[in-house]
Amino acid sequence: MVIAALALTLLAGTAKADSTWDYQGNVNNYGGMFYNPGPGGVIPPGDLQPNPCNCALSGSVTVDASYNVLSWSFAAAGDTWTNANSAGSFDVLIASGNPFVLWGLGLTNTSGDTLQSGYTTFSMLSARDSTGNGDLMVLGDPGTWTEAVGTPEPGTLALLGIGLAGFALERKKRVDSTVWEPLG
């Protein structure tokens, strides 16, 4: 019984659910020479260009266990792109088990607004968040992706519960079968 409960508990940890990744872009547009000086660096004169909306792209993508994109939602400069109102493509590079190390996406919503985001060569030259209407323009300053903390699949929780219940029953059986003798 203990072995069965232990096996069920271990199985509970192996299920992989869909995961959601949040994206936060940046506001600075290093459009002069696509130069990002990094934290504390000095920006050469003329290198910081206007970002018309002075806003950043933000959004999220939900992927399955194989990192196939299931749904998305992005917003910038008053426009939105979701899996319900847009179509396009996602390219996700997985390195060392982490998705979105490099990425590229291109979406067009039902209003005809286009969105491009990408960081495709580890070069600031390839870092871009922009909209087709020119409201958002951020070059040379790639945003960051973070995994949202997910909730385990119901099956995982059920297996964990069964495993813990098995441990509790085994413990109760052992306590009930103990013979108590008076001391002294």
Image: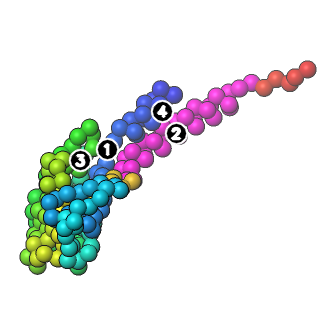
Tell me what residue is drawn at x 40 percent, y 39 percent: 12
Q: Residue furthest top?
A: 184
Report the side of 85 relative to 65 (left or right): left
According to the image, label 1 marks what residue? 16
Camera-nearest residue between 44 and 180: 44
Q: Earlier in the sequence, mark 4 or mark 1?
A: 4
- Give left or right: position of 122 versus 182: left
Residue at numbered disc 4: 5
Is the residue under label 2 in contact with that under label 3 (CB below 8 Å)?
Answer: no
Alpha carbons under labels 1 and 2: distance apart:
20 Å
What's the amino acid at mark 3?
A: Val
Q: Give the quadrant of the C terminus.
A: top right
From the top left corner, tell me how far across and down residue 150 is, in percent: 37, 53
x and y percent of residue 156 in the render? Answer: 39, 45
Magenta stretch, main secondary structure class: helix
User: Is tag 3's residue or tag 4's residue first in the polypeptide sequence?
Assistant: 4
Circles 1, 2 touching at the beta carbon (< 8 Å): no
Task: Judge the density around disc 2: few (<14), some (14-19), many (≥20) Cα neighbours within 10 Å.
Answer: some
Q: Nearer the viewer, residue 81 or 47?
A: 47
Find disc 3 in the rendering and name its residue: 101
